[in-house]
Amino acid sequence: MELTCFMCSSQIQNGCDGLGRHLRRVHAVSLTEELNGTGFICGYGDCRLPFDFFFNLRRHIRDEHMTAAASGQPSNNDASNLGDGMDHGDPAPFMGVHVNNGEEHLIGHPNNNENVEMEVDLRSEIIKMICQFHANPAMTGAMISSILDSYEKLLMTSNRILRSRILTELRRNTVDNAVITNIEQILEFDNPVTGLKSYDQQINAMVENCGYIEPIEFLLGDRFDMVLNRKTQRLEPKLVNETAQYVPTIPILKMVLANKEIRNAIDNEEPSLPGMLSSFRDGTCYKNHPFFKKYPNAIRLRIYYDEAEIVGPLGSRTGIHKLGAFYFEIGNLPQHMNSQLSSIHISTLFCSVDVKKYGFEKVLAPFMSDLAILESDEGIPLHFEDGIYTLRASIETFCGDGLAVHEIFGLLGPSANLFCRLCLYDRDALHRGSQEEFERRTEAVYEQQLQYLRDNNYSDASKTATGMRERPFLNESRYFKTYSNKVFDIMHDYLHGNCQIVVKLVLHRWIIVDNRFKVDFLNEAISHFNYGYFENKNKPSANFTRSILNDIKHATNQKACQMWCLIRVLPFLVCGKVPEDDEYLQMVLLLLEIMEIKFATSVPVNHLSLLDELYKDFLSMFSRLFPDVAPINKMHHGSHGPECIEWSGPLSLYNCIRFEAKHAELKLRAQNVHNFKNPPKTLIRVSQSVQCSRWNSGDVKINRVEVISGKKMFTCHTKSRQYLLDLGLSDDEQVMTAKSVKVNGIEYRVKAFIALSQSGDRFENLMTFGEIREIIVLENRVFFLSSICTTVHFDHSVHAYCVELNDLDHSATFTDASSLPFHKPFCYWLKPTSNALYISLRHLIF
């Protein structure tokens, strides 16, 4: 059932449940209290009856409109039937008697359409509840079964008690026996939990009612296992099938495209500004791509692959239960939507030992079959209310860490002599610190090396000479070729690579060699630094020891986001201990300047040459400061940065950090489920429950506003009064003022800082920041009343902007959240030697 919100006129799916969820999240309306002013207004069709309480509205919709819809008759409370125009707040009197136009009749008489509707709804709600249970990573199958058993007992007991009380009351009031018998029949219903106890029954119910896409189990091969015969108590050989799990790609895309808002976003993808690289469409690859040139709005699949160890790393089962997983996301969608884990869809799940036995050709066969259909010129016609949508898709890019990409691309591992997947740069050149350009792995080079492998029967010597193992199965795609995949993951290359080695070597120099401060000082500084609300969750671990710094390995035991925070905060931590002109500090600052461009969500074309020069300076400085340290592969990867950005768009689009989060979710579920008989089958079903719960809820939107904490105020009492009056509001109208609000998943809070201008030239046009003083929510729009800060200068010693706060009376701005140049808030940092406020950017804002 579709209803119209009486506050913002939005069309809401899923009837009263959807309306209630919308009122709570968007308008911060309490459903348990009386709504002053207009009251809760019915939004079904032309009906506009007001109600003081939400439960009255719910009962009105159930009794009037659901009954009318079931019987095919027009609703009795249409606008034309209001008559007196009075408040019909509660149209359902006591004891099931309904008053309508002065006539009384009993609910459910002469037919039981309402009862049937209620039964269907009750079972449907239970199935949705089961789906949400499966989507919870902490829930196991045994726990869900236990909850259902308890719920069944509670439901049937409540019904029995209610029936007894109602029938007793009816008999006491000498109601006709025929009426009592009819009501008794109405109150009887079948157990809605029947047929939902077993796991297979629950899956079947979710397929029928919730749009659950059931994975396909396909055979890879078989093996003999020694299994204990319970009768003979002897081990006997048993043939066991080795399988993989595949979620069909086409049904997933159909599920996503069933949302009209998603289709509109794909068909009307916004172009970037001239001279800017903001998406894959801005890169050379898209502009020259034969498929996307012909079908510019075709779905672009961004593929990711990784392996996950689902048992403890020190256990005896390590390696046996290691899983491999392929995921994909839709590159056409806005980046804020793709950052949600539910926008990352699992494609194939299998045991890693099986892929070593059978190869990726067998594992990827179902996906490649679907891809061949999606890449065809005919496409797949999908019929929607607004017309026919032709579904076509191809692979945009392939992402992953170095080891995973090399495996899929048929290359030798990262430890090979020819370790680079974009050029023929060798390990000797890496150790020499050579910055010369080597021959690129073009299509011609690829075919030449593949032929060389065939001519030499794929000998070890030929593999070493080419850096290739085999022809990658992904090249069976009509349009995607591995040698054209110019993407390096900035998370692995920097946060798990360059940053780790630079931070560790620099700290070793300062603490072990120069003795500028003790390791205890560093740990204490990390622990006590005020990172602010938005960075506190990424606070680095204060776990440094002299033994860690002396270790030849480059690991610092920091997670990716912790390292991102640590390298930005490091200049603040050592302020006063290390001179500003210290050359090791200058190398850290140079790396920060490079990362600001590499991690940017939009990159000007004219910054690519600057990035190239900066990275060459970084490599030269590293070789000069640490001549005895061999550079790592990821240092060479960085030299391809400008080429990759020009070819594929900003590298932040292919940051694997969200894919890793999805992968971590899979590991967590494995530990909770603790079923190792067929882990891929168990886990992919659980993962599909999450996708089903999210995408078939009817609440998927491109732009979403959620008030976390706030209250209603009259316009005249807000700090933003004059701005609201300019928008056409009056003093006696109420608006929502929020302390905290989420816009497209990004949280904003009062006292947080926002960017009011782009980065520009630091030496002439400094960025402008504002401190949020008030947050106003008007329907689905969010406004920030901010005091404009004075940007004093850009402090190169800490690589941050120094700002001063101003009063609202001095300078203020009223900004729509959608018009911000950057949609993430900041918090200020402090130097230990001064009280000045500093704002450190994760990347440049263009």
Image (cartoon, rainbow, N blue to C red):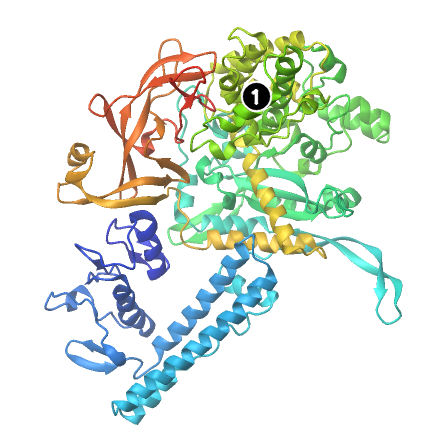
Tell me: residue 610, above or below residue 783: above
> Which residue bears the numbered disc 1?
521
What is the count of numbered marks?
Answer: 1
Q: Position of residue 129 (x, y in %)?
A: 48, 62
Dot 1: element: helix
337 with respect to 461 (left or right):
left
Q: Residue at x 41, y 69 (%)?
A: 121
Between 823 and 772, the one lying in front of the other is 772
773 with respect to 493 (left or right):
left
Q: Residue at x 67, y 19 (%)?
A: 440
Q: Position of residue 196 (x, y in %)?
A: 55, 69
| Location of residue 111 by image quarter | bottom left
Q: Is residue 156 visible?
A: yes
Q: Position of residue 632 (x, y in %)?
A: 69, 20
Between 752 and 698, the one lying in front of the other is 752
Q: Position of residue 830 (x, y in %)?
A: 42, 21
Quarter in which the N terminus is drawn: bottom left
| Location of residue 232 by image quarter | bottom right
